[in-house]
Image: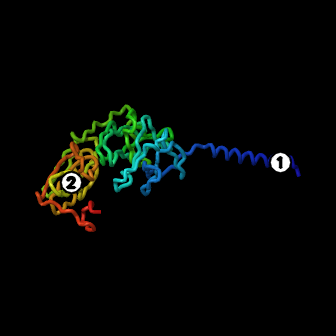
Amino acid sequence: MNHSSSARTFFAIIGALFIALLVGTLQPATTQAQGSTIKINFQISGASTPSGYLADTGQTYGNRGGGYSYGWNSDHTDVTRERAVHSDQRYDTLAHFHNGGRWEIALPNGTYTVKTVIGDPSHGDTTHTLNVEGVNYWTNQSLVANEFGSKTLPVTVSDGRLTLNSGSAADKQTKITFLEITPGGTPPPTATAAPPNCDPEVHLTGSILSNNTTGRIINSSSSCTYDVGMASYRKFDEIIDNQEIFDWVETTIGPNQTIEVSVDLPNCATQIDLFYGDVLLSLNGQRYGTRLLAARHINGTNYCQPVPEGNCPAGDLTAL
């Protein structure tokens, strides 16, 4: 038996295994290619995470396990929040962007449809600027407390990471609540393509039909799509802040479309609002303002009565 040859073979095998192990160790972590939506909830450490979401607690970029690598370019744990006022945990938690802050997640190169939601259920004293992979979502967007901005746009990843930033916004102005990333979608227009001039106040008109339960919305734009909706509010008196939401519907209206939406109504004094953007679940201290397409008050002074505890009339979500 040639002991020298056997030794060389043994050490060659050991060397090959060591190199393979070293290469595997040094390989940068990359988020696994996902066939379904990746959902990120921005929250404080220790808060409950909504079902189906991954928690981001403001830590710097790193391997989060499960094939996911994401995080911030600097420590943001000091600007994560949980307000404990909203029934939907996704809207109750958030993270501010520090000035120059950047959040990233490792993804295979390609086109993604990205939904972002901004806002704060308790405070409305900031303006929000957000860019996703170079695509501007909002610039200096003002929102009152418990009003949220939601936008879904296609973006293209070409460097192995999806990147969010708040541009030149001041420290802690932009607040992000949650993020949803879906592979695929139509690639965004190139830099040389002129974006559509979208102005919902110009393009959208609305009316409430004679049956009071149905609203009609017309979009005169040939290129813009808008979020729209309709809501009914129970009136206990003539003070708008005291009204409680009874039923609502949210949908989108495409270019050159006319749509009809419907809501249920209580058997008492009611305010009915047709609007664009997000529904206001409460009118306490906030209004639709210029987002209101049409409004109607019905049933005069037949004011609604508070719902006894334990009773929940059909369609009345405020008693849940």
- Residue 95: give x, y in percent of width and height: 41, 45
| Disc 1 target residue | 7
In the image, 18 versus 75, the foreground residue is 75
* Quadrant the C terminus occupies: bottom left
* 174 shown above or below 53: above
Mark 1 or 2, which is nearer the eye? 2
| Disc 2 target residue | 242
Residue type of the residue flagged with mark 1: Ala
When asked about the image quadrant of residue 114, the answer is top left
- Residue 176: give x, y in percent of width and height: 39, 44
Residue type of the residue flagged with mark 2: Asn
Q: Please rate how many residues cluster around mark 2, counting C-alpha atoms within 10 Å: few if below 14, some from 14 to 19, many from 20.
A: some
Residue found at the far bottom of this picture = 310
Residue found at the far left of this picture = 300
Q: How far separated are the C-alphas under marks 1 and 2?
A: 86 Å
In the image, 118 versus 92, the foreground residue is 92
